[in-house]
Amino acid sequence: MTSARPKRPVGELLGDPARLHLHYGHGHPAVPYDFEDTLESWYVKVTYEMAGDEEWEDEEGEESRAPAVGTEVGHVILWRLRDDTGDSGWEAADAESGDLEVIASAVLGRSGGAGYSAAFEKAVVHPVGDLLILDRVHLDRAWRGFGLGPILAAEAIRRLLCGGGVARPTWGISNFVIVDRACGAVICR
């Protein structure tokens, strides 16, 4: 697990982190496919600025190390396992990838049956609703070490959570930590 504590001095940042923008995209085939109502993929592109950010233009100069407007500097990948679709969330995750299956198994159990694992039910007061799985957070090397990854992941989760639960990928998942009891957010640790 990465730490939110910066490991590099702020002076090494290529630009102002306040100028980072998150762009959310959900893609799927135009034709029916397995588990189309159960598993959603979300790609959150992180760019430096957006076209039309005129308020920042006066800060750019010849000595600026900042990336060009609209440059992608990273991304966050999340998956939403929909509840109550009639399909097994575990089977949907297993069909997509081994990584998702490992995460889903920790929350749903390996049986593929209805309901949640005993450990998850013990950790969460009301385990109902969709499950949002944080799959990956990637930042270009120049943007790493400043604590931005967890901040960007948290913002993407906050925007997409909609009252469900969230699971973070990790190997050897053994317990759950409640992040926000009000919205049911859960991180597997």
Image: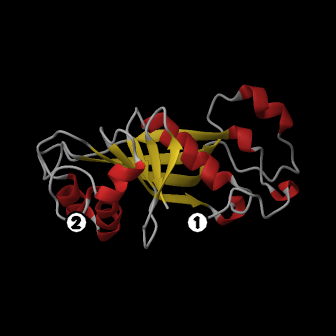
Residue hosting label 1: 1
Identify the residue at horizontal 16%, vertical 50% (top origin): 114
Give the vertical position of 113 relative to 53 (above or below): below
Residue 72 in the image, given as x and y percentages of width and height: 58, 51
Along the line of sight, the residue nearer the viewer: 1 or 108:
108
Q: Nearer the viewer, mark 1 or mark 2?
A: 2
Give the vertical position of 107 relative to 110 (above or below): above
Residue type highlighted by circle 2: Arg
Q: CA distance from mark 1 to mark 2?
A: 24 Å
Identify the residue at horizontal 51%, vertical 37% (top origin): 158
Of pointers 1 and 2, the one earlier in the residue sequence: 1
Along the line of sight, the residue nearer the viewer: 38 or 66:
38
Residue hosting label 2: 110
Residue 39 in the image, given as x and y percentages of width and height: 25, 48
Residue 4 in the image, given as x and y percentages of width and height: 69, 56
Considering the numbered disc 2 on the image, is that residue within a helix, a strand or a loop? loop
Residue type highlighted by circle 1: Met
152 sits left or right of 105 in the view: right
Residue 74 in the image, given as x and y percentages of width and height: 57, 55
Give the vertical position of 28 relative to 143 (above or below): above
Along the line of sight, the residue nearer the viewer: 62 or 88:
88
Q: Quadrant of residue 51?
A: top right
Residue reaching furthest bottom? Answer: 172
